[in-house]
Image (tube, rainbow, N blue to C red):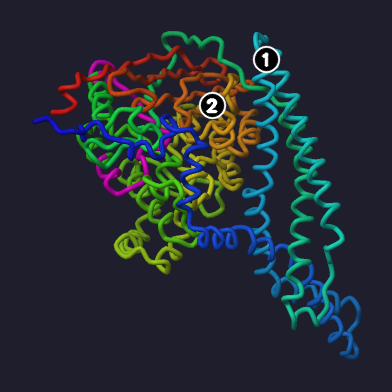
Amino acid sequence: MAPLIEPRAGDAEDDFSSTKKRSLLAIAGSLLGEINLPKLALAWVILALVPGVLLGLAPLVATAWFASVADRLFALAGIGSLLLLALIAVAGWYGFRPLLRLVERSFWSLNSLAVQPVYALCREGLRHLAERFLTVGASEDKRAALRAATAIGAGLLASAGAATVVGLVWPATRWSGEFADLVHPLRLLVPALANTVAVMAAYLALASLAWGLADGLMDQPRDLGGFDEAPEQARRWRVVHLSDIHIVGERYGFRIESGRAGPRGNERLGQVLDRLDEIHAAEPLDLLLITGDMTDAGRSAEWAEFLDLMARHPALAERCLILPGNHDLNIVDRANPARLELPTSPGKRLRQMRTLSAMAAIQGERVQVLDRERAGLAGTLAAALEPHREAIGVFADAGTLRLSAGLSTVWADVFPMVLPPAEADGLGVILLNSNAETHFSFTNALGLVAEEDLQAMLAVLRRFPKARWIIGLHHHPVEYPQPAKAFSERIGTALINGSRFVRQLKPMAHRLVAMHGHRHVDWIGRCGPLKIVSAPSPVMEATDDMPTGFYIHTLAAAADGGLALLAPERIEIAPRPPAALSS
């Protein structure tokens, strides 16, 4: 007798977090009843309140301390003013260097948490309105001009709002402290927070003007228009670009975003790899690049499935490079978007170590990491991780907070990863981590390339001045020049500093191609000379009975020393018959 409910086809529970089956408003409404308010409050304290207090306290503590030290030194007879100044400077440097570091980290933490997102929200909001109401039937040039104008308008709007905030909080600020304040520090809480709001708002007011002007004057994204051509004798590289394969840990498992609106299980991915094996046997491939979201929620079972699949295709595995996506790192609970974890929780670190372990297994002997100054290459990923192997294994087994803290720098230090070119003018690959530090499943998709990683990437590009490069990251550097389905889609998945990322690459863009995933959108375009390739997902945006596809790109050495992007080959994966899926 047939079951009353076919378990292989799933049910409503599989759609609980699906943005394809439910609106974001419906998901948000569901999570309000599930969210842990005490944990949310504590997370807010750790992420915003503590950095804010430290930043605002800095001038108060510093002035109180210097005043106290100066009074005592002046009381010592025979000490000249220059010697006194030198002693205060030395004491201040060594006594307050840890405080200055805390202040610096707090500033950039708040910048990525509140400042840059505010400007990005204004920019994308204006652009969304302009594209919806002003670009119907407009030419590509007019759409580009509107994008530029809205960036400048967003800078002005954010600046005006931030200046208003400065004016409102200024009466509560206080910029000098007294020794008595150090005895009663609680009296500094309100002025410290007011100082922080004033500093960050003033920074936003100035920075948003600079960002808006820079974004408005930069080359705007456009469809590519046409592919390059290269002579037959030019060196060529065949690159398979996959992304967002979202491996699940169950045979009939459904993916978070698609629910029952997408293929179940990992059968479709197996078809993709089988097809690539056939293609490689007929015409060899040089590289298989997977730009993030290898797993659906970063679980151990999902990584096990990924490694098992790659082990069954050794020719592909030895050409494969992977980088982390938001689903590999930032999903706290695949079944409940209301789940959040504290910034101190070992859960995030565990997902990082799982990802790092898979990266080491796939590419550890081929990619290299940077030295401590982040200016040159220092050896393979495998060699860099070897001293930490035992600690990572113990942490994975115990998962304690203490062991997690001991691995805090391991993850950050391995990015960017570099596959150096085989020849001075060959093709190399730089792999970035573009995931923002979020601890809440509902905000998991935001992106941010750390400034330190951005500068390290530029140092690598300068170190190989003749080489061609693929820049791999998960998030899209720019919003595509086409209307977004929803405003929440373009702000909830954005790379916050994507415009800066593109501007920094412009001087070397003729020898670069940026490849990303994240949005599951099939798009190839450019920002000025920088070519940008977005990979469609071969397992998402389609049901079991629909075909999916991916691309094999051919890159070639251009005569002017640049990197040519030739017309790609689209590979379609046909659906399997229902009987084959159920057997």
Q: Hey, what amino acid is under mark 1?
A: Thr
250 in relation to 568, above or below: below
193 in relation to 260, above or below: below
Residue 232, how many percent across, how many down?
42, 8
The local crowd at label 2, few if under 14, some if 14 to 19, many if 20 or more residues have their Cα within 10 Å, is: many
| Marking on residue 19 | none
Quarter holding residue 233: top left
The residue identified by callout 1 is: 135
The local crowd at label 1, few if under 14, some if 14 to 19, many if 20 or more residues have their Cα within 10 Å, is: some
Q: Hey, what amino acid is under mark 2?
A: Leu
Which mark is in front, 1 or 2?
A: 1
Q: CA distance from mark 1 to mark 2?
A: 30 Å
Residue 425, how many percent across, how many down?
49, 27
Q: Is 469 contained in the magenta span?
A: no
Instruction: Please tell me which residue is depicted at 53% across the width and 36% down the height of the picture.
Output: 493
Q: Helix, strand or loop at disc 2?
A: strand
| Marking on residue 512 | 2
Quarter holding residue 350: bottom left
Which of the marked residues, 1 or 2, is nearer the chain's N terminus? 1
Instruction: Please tell me which residue is depicted at 25% across the width and 44% down the height of the picture.
Output: 304
Magenta stretch, residue numbers: 279-305
Q: Where is the C terminus found, in terms of image quarters? A: top left
Q: Residue furthest left?
A: 1
Residue 450, how many percent across, how many down?
58, 46
In front of the other: 89 or 572? 572
Instruction: Please tell me which residue is depicted at 35% across the width and 29% down the height of the picture.
Output: 288
Instruction: Please tell me which residue is depicted at 46% across the width and 49% down the height of the picture.
Output: 338
Q: Could you tell whether 94 is left or right of 451 in the image?
A: right
Q: Is 302 contained in the magenta span?
A: yes
550 in relation to 464, above or below: above
Q: Could you tell whether 456 is left or right of 332 in the image?
A: right
Residue 404, how many percent across, how many down?
42, 63
